[in-house]
Image (cartoon, rainbow, N blue to C red):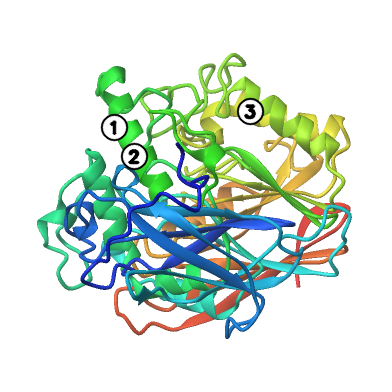
Amino acid sequence: MLPGISPATAATTSATKKDPFTLGVASGDPLPDGVVLWTRLAPDPLAPLGGMDRRTYSVQWEIAADERFSRVVKRGTAKAEPEYGHSVHVDVRGLQPARDYYYRFRTGGFVSPAARTKTAPAPEQLLPSMTFAVASCQAIWEGWFTAHRDLAARHHDVVLFLGDYIYEFGNDRGVRPGDDDPLRTRQTVTLDEYRQRYAYYKTDPDLQAAHHTAPWIAVLDDHEVVDNWADRYAGSTPPDDFLVRRANAFRAYWENMPLRAPQFPAGPDMQLYRRLRYGRLAEFSMLDTRQYRDDQVNGDGIKAPNAATADPTRSILGFPQERWLLDGLTASRSTWNVLGHQTAITLLDTVSGPGVAVPMDAWDGYSASRDRLLGGIDERGIQNVVSLAGDLHRTVVSDLALDFTDPDSKVVATEFVGTSISSAQDGEDLDAGGRVLLEENPHMKFGNFQRGYISCEITPDLWTSEFRVCDRVTVPDGTVSTRTKLAVESGAAAVQQV
Ligand SMILES: [Fe+2]
């Protein structure tokens, strides 16, 4: 039986001796009538199986309309099973749309932290406004999660997390104490190693706060598995071997994120692309550009575009997902059509002066997919498409035009690539690489190379992206400020300064 649909009876009750809620709680994938509640029992988070034995535990959950839990609206019992890393996924239904709720778990006399979540609006509801955060890339040894602390304080309606929640490789030169622990310095390959890596990340109080104050909608990128993987391919690893590792990584990802049963992986396969609707105001098409893509061409890296990158038989989404995306955008009845995904769609020429070199791992390496998406948006007259991505560890804001080499080409969508939470350490406002990007890519309207996230507010008329940046992340007490605000008017794809 899949976790998340466990019956309210039949669990073995056995109390843990220590507080098992060291990894906090989370909620995710809001619907008008429900949300997924998550926790994972781990009294010794970095020990194998989080310090749990191999028994099944029963965990009580409750969700209330108020912070004091005086108006509990649903409660039940779920199973925490060793097969699933003692994770708990409860798919609560029967809630009211567009409402704040509060939830917590208990087992064996221990009570979890209480957390806030929020349901999506009803299908025909047009909210006057909504807020969400866009975050990605949190290499824990590269910095403190100060951006998450700031994000948590804003109590957004929802948080979009666009990949690199963990990093699979080891690192013994971290900025945090204890970063030379072998559990953190070795590469994750086995299921237990991935589980321990998630546990290490999830003990961070700022990351927990970001989960405790809003529901998340998450997709993964490469580092939840291994650097720049593509379908069955990862460096020189034989595909059959890599699929075993991919299955381990997907299993640990599912165990550690607030995902529904349809996202439960079957071995190395996981249905991650999905659509979440916020009534008539916004639709979020969450994409998976890793699992179905063709392998990178030209040896990966940053290379000149050529016939291989433009090959129309190649795809970064896979053809079924390309169709699902365009058909969904066409059928949308919401004002804003948001793409939540991994790598930049925009052209990223990284070479100063003549010549062009672009990342083979991003949409530049799959330009026929980009042409089909942007061309399809234009042909079908789809309005207000906004692409949100991560991966670059820098902020890149671009007008998405049908032809990036023609300055007069029609702009059909907008892209906000958010910077990293911590990956790449402190950074600076505009580094040499960022300057080249702005010079070489006239469709690029703003760039920044500090750590942080995007705080967005949308109304039926206006999209506003506020770029929150950290002065430093290599020290625990950095400060966060607004670098700039950029807007898009409904019906006009071009980015403008607020
Ligand atoms: Fe990253």
**Mark 2 — residue?**
249
Residue 55: x percent and y percent?
A: 25, 50
Q: Which of 378 and 328 is in front in this view?
A: 328
Give the mark nearer the N terminus: 3 vs 2: 2
Q: Residue furthest top?
A: 313
Q: In which quadrant is the N terminus drawn? A: top left
Instruction: Tell me the residue that label 1 is attached to.
Output: 245
Q: Which amino acid does label 3 sit on?
A: Gln
Work out whether mark 3 precedes mark 1 in sequence or the reverse, and give the earlier one.
1
CB-based contact (under 8 Å), mark 2 and mark 1: yes
* Quadrant (top left, top right, bottom left, bottom right) of the C terminus: bottom right
Secondary structure found at label 1 = helix
Q: Do callouts 3 and 1 mark residues in contact (Cβ within 8 Å)?
A: no
- Left or right of 485, for residue 6: left
**Percent position of residue 185, x then y:** 15, 54
Which residue is tagged 3?
Answer: 321
